[in-house]
Image (cartoon, coloured by chain):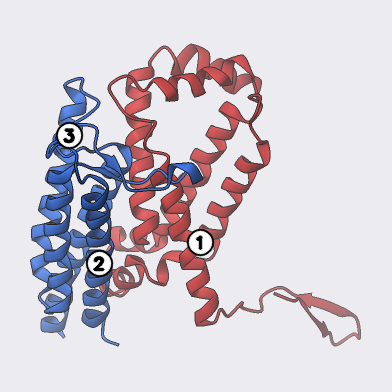
Amino acid sequence: MADTEIPEADGRASVAHDEPLVLGPASRRVLALVRIVVGVLWLSNLGWKTPPHFGVLRNYVRDAVDHPVFGPYAWLAEHVILRHFGPFAWMVLFVESLLAACLMLGLCTRLFGIIGAIQAAFIGLSVAFTPGEWPWSYYLMVAVHVVVVATAAGRTWGLDELLRPVLRARRSRLSALLLRCT
Amino acid sequence: MSLLEKLSRYQVAWGTVGLIAGLFGLFHSRGLAFTWARGAETGLPHYELHWMTYNTLGALVAVALAAIGGAAGATRRPALGWVPAAGFALIALQTLLQWRTGKGDNLFGSTGPTFGFSIALMLAFAATAFLAGLFAALETEH
């Protein structure tokens, strides 16, 4: 969005930041495709995070200790996550399954976009400095989730588009909260 | 386009996606044992696209459920979406229970992506069937 210079009464120019960005149908569809691709990214990576042993996931968490990105997180990984690895691994499986499903479907997209950005940041904190990894892939993963949140990408080709009129018609606190998640 | 029409299209779209995935599963699992526990992958592993895995039984069940979901949208009977929603929920639950018992492989040849995809289709059909009921209730109110 281009900022617009507006002359004020005293002759000085100010910059208006409140000009709304209007997206055409083509742009909205592109953003919906981006959302679906992000969902497929999570789906595709569920294959190596499965029970009963969660072996590959454990190795990646260990990378946070062996190749620390951020000291406090390395301490957390060593003393909390690896010591209680079972519940943590199940949580990762459930969260990432829901991320895959909800981003592909466009269901509560903004909520799951935020969760996805946080999860991507934690993955980056674990493995960004592991030899052979490219740290920018994790910065980009966070960025693409932020785009999905900022553009409410579930409102085109997504369940959010169908959900919002129902939530708007029902005036309850839960509906208002869910409306913010879409 | 009315909301009910959009909802039906959504069911047809996800029914078609499920159907294609199941048909790919049938194609890739041809010649393997009917309930081969590891399942055949439908993705393109060479390109890091690890998608759903199915054995023939899993693929047939997925095709049948997705076809019902798609038909629910095509015939404008969205409540029929509860059937595939329940079916995909059972597939996800079965996968989960078999994991819990310490087996990495299972009856439908499911792995992580199959589990996630089953949850996606379960949510898609359950949400659309549920929303169809709500739309009807709201129309009656007004």
Residue topped by disc 2: B16
Residue at the image position 56 percent from the left and 27 percent from the top: A126
Task: Give a yes or no on whether discs 2 and 3 share a subunit.
Answer: yes
Residue topped by disc 1: A34
Write down the quadrant of residue B132 in the picture: bottom left
Residue at the image position 37 percent from the left and 38 percent from the top: A46
* Chain to which mark 2 belongs: B
* Chain to which mark 3 belongs: B
Which color is chain A depicted in?
red
Write down the quadrant of residue B6 in the picture: bottom left
Query: CA–CA distance between discs 1 and 2?
Result: 20 Å
Q: Earlier in the sequence, mark 2 or mark 3?
A: 2
Q: Which chain is blue?
A: B
**Residue type at numbered disc 2:** Thr
Check disc 2: other Cα within 10 Å, few if <14, some if 14-19, many if 20+: some
Residue topped by disc 3: B36
